[in-house]
Amino acid sequence: MENKLTEELRRFNYLVGGIDQVYHEAALKLGLSDSEMAVLYTICGEGKPCPLSLICRLAGLSKQTANSALRKLENSGVIRLEAVDGKQKSAALTDKGRTLAEHTVSKIISAENRIFDSWTERERTEYIRLTQNYLNAFRAEIDKL
């Protein structure tokens, strides 16, 4: 069986890869690894201590990758891990972490907000709707494998 990428799928994959590359370049410019940036971004986005399971899910990181980044951030005094319910832990920014986030991921979030603010409400809604539809359909297809 021969499967070929359609021109639209090729373009879509190029765009997704390009967006991932820009986030990677941003992390490098800000002195963070991709996983450290993803963890900090998630905690900042939540605006409060964040359960580790939620960090993994929202950041799209495996448990192992997230735990490595969390350990490094904790050892450098950027976050503190807090016990929640029994085994469950949550990550919170320290004062040092809030300062680091202000100089790093907050810049990314501001850039993203400027982009979204330049779009009409209809454009934002449509973009999010279509992206969610794609994610849901793709997840369903992968579940069939």
Image: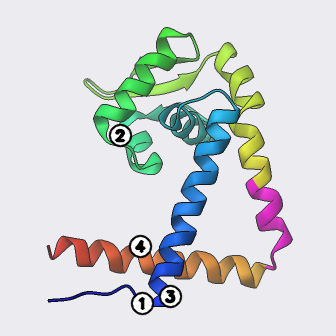
Question: Please, what is the three-letter code of the amino acid marked with disc 4?
Answer: Leu
Instruction: Give whichever of 126, 61 is nearer the camera.
Output: 61
Question: Please, what is the three-letter code of the amino acid marked with disc 2?
Answer: Ser
How was this image coloured? Answer: rainbow
Q: Looking at the picture, how far across and down is residue 80, in whole percent?
A: 50, 16
Question: Please, what is the three-letter code of the amino acid marked with disc 1?
Answer: Thr
Assign a secondary structure to mark 1: loop
Q: Nearer the viewer, mark 3 or mark 2?
A: 3
**Residue in the picture at 31% in, 29% down:** 88
Note whether 63 is above or below 79 in the view shown. below
Instruction: Place residue 46 in its image quadrant.
Output: top right
Q: Looking at the picture, how far across and down is residue 145, in whole percent?
A: 14, 73
Q: Tell me, yes or no, whether the two marked residues, 3 and 2, touch with CB atoms within 8 Å.
A: no
Which of the labelled discs sits on residue 6, or is there none?
A: 1
Q: Gap in Å between the C-alphas at discs 1 and 4?
A: 18 Å
Looking at the image, is mark 4 or mark 3 earlier in the sequence? 3
To which residue does mark 3 refer?
A: 8
**Residue in the picture at 48% in, 72% down:** 13
Which of the labelled discs sits on residue 135, or is there none?
A: 4
Q: Nearer the viewer, mark 2 or mark 1?
A: 1
Looking at the image, is mark 3 or mark 2 earlier in the sequence? 3
Assign a secondary structure to mark 2: helix
Q: Gap in Å between the C-alphas at discs 3 and 1?
A: 5 Å
Q: Gap in Å between the C-alphas at discs 3 and 2?
A: 34 Å
Looking at the image, is mark 1 or mark 4 earlier in the sequence? 1
Q: Gap in Å between the C-alphas at discs 4 and 3?
A: 16 Å
As for residue 114 lying within the magenta part, the answer is yes
Instruction: Place residue 66 in its image quadrant.
Output: top left
Note whether 47 is above or below 143 in the view shown. above
Which of the labelled discs sits on residue 53, or is there none?
A: 2
Numbered range of the magenta stretch? 112-120
Q: Gap in Å between the C-alphas at discs 2 and 4?
A: 20 Å
